[in-house]
Image (cartoon, rainbow, N blue to C red):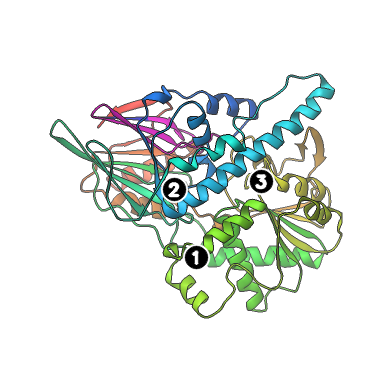
Amino acid sequence: MKLSFHGAAQTVTGSMHLVEINGSRLLLDCGMYQGRRKECYERNHNFPFDVSTIDAVILSHAHIDHSGNLPNLVKQGYNGPIYATRATAHLADLMLRDSGHIQEKQADSINFHNKKRKAEKVLPLYDEEDAKKVKPLLHELDYDKPFEAAPGAMATFHDAGHILGSASIALNLEEKKHKTSLWFSGDIGRRDLPILRDPVLPKQADFLLMESTYGDKPHRSPEEAYVEMRDVILRTLDRKGKVIIPSFAVGRTQELVYNLSQMYAAGELPAVPIYVDSPLAVNASIIFRQHNECYDDEMKELLRSGHPALDFKLLTYITDVEESKELNERKDPMIIISAAGMAETGRIVYHIRWAIENKRNTIMIVSWQAPETLGRRIADRENKVKIFGEEYKLKAEVATINGLSSHAGQDLLIEYAKGVKQSAKSIFLVHGEERGALPLMEKLKENRLTPVFYPAMHTSVEL
């Protein structure tokens, strides 16, 4: 038995790990690496293994950095099962089709400008038609019910509390009478976040494969983040500005809408228009309403009482591109939530372009931003940023609300790892940059959780 780290190793995005057992090969996630455009294309297009040798894929959740390269895998010949929770299967189909559409449009836009510059033509990694071919391979499964992913490999999904349908994956493995267990955390959520249940922590595993995105620090509490978000919005509206929020269409957008609905219900938010400008977010919110099996008790009670948790008076969902463009022509105060979360693609890029040079406006960063993305450059408060090849001065306020993260902070990550303290032979930290993983490694060692490894890309270990 062997485990290989082919993505999100010493970086955050592109989750992809390979388990080999009894001659079968299982892929845990097939995520898209995100960063510099040229490097992204090369890393995502070229798999570090023969695609025809993969027997099954087990998907932890639908975020693009965990699912986004599935269309490319299928495009290159994969036609086996892709196991996922029911909500993840529904969201993944939606998100992958959207990803393909965006890549087509982005390539068209780049090629339009490249033609003027007489630069080389670019191709999308995959298009919407490629993405549609993933859906027939998706196998929808329930939480907490074991299934055979391959001979000698029994898998079970446990709620990870990160986004709708997110799961950690427990694998019980047997080869030539040798038995072992592997727990893959996927992305670990947080306690007491709106809408979703808390993450299930592991109780036993021989090997723990665990995320480390925020391994360097604990988060502010959701309550503190709520107050900070409210105060940023109020001071922006006081100066007649717009609040522009790059947000992941799935998970983060619904949490933001939930918080805004709470602010309005409590009389804390003035009657200003709020727009969710993302066809993907609109459709994802519909899927959210269909999967109350993922809701926590508080969310279920709100819905029973008639509280509009994902829809309320001030809120307008926008899908039409012309309506989206009109928002940038308006001068009145408003709140715009738009995808994508790292501000690399989608309508949010246009909203930022029109808002960035006006000091009345605020760009609110509510999630981790990958290196070299527009979102990271804004979060780092660079004086000038390039958008569509043109330079813009950063005059708008930048507000970073760390406490809204749906990833576990250092304190919960330590508690998570302690769940396997009595059984673990090795802990592998993935899905984290050095600044997150290395401090967490030291904290785990202080808590006598050893050995702990931070594996390099394309390395392997025997299980």
Which circle, 2 or 1, is nearer the viewer? Answer: 1
Residue beneath disc 1: 195
Which residue type carries mark 1? Ile
* Magenta stretch holds residue 16: yes
Q: Is residue 34 above or below residue 240?
A: above
Q: Quadrant of residue 457?
A: top left
**Of the image marks 2 and 3, the number of the one nearer the N terminus:** 2
Rendered-image quadrant of the C terminus? top left
> Which quarter of the figure is the N terminus placed in?
top left
Question: Label 2: which residue?
Answer: 187
Mark 3 vs mark 1, CA separation in Å: 27 Å
Badge 2 or badge 1: first in the primary sequence: 2
Report helix, strand or loop for mark 3.
helix
The residue closer to the viewer here, 370 or 414, is 370
Residue 397 marker: none
Q: Does residue 155 appear to the left or right of 439 in the view shown?
A: left
Mark 1: secondary structure: loop
Question: Which amino acid type is marked by label 2?
Answer: Asp
Label 2 Cα crowd, 10 Å radius (few <14 / some 14-19 / many 20+): many
Q: Is residue 240 magenta?
A: no
**Residue located beneath label 3 in the image:** 379
Residue stretch in magenta: 5-34
Cα–Cα gap, marks 2 and 1: 17 Å
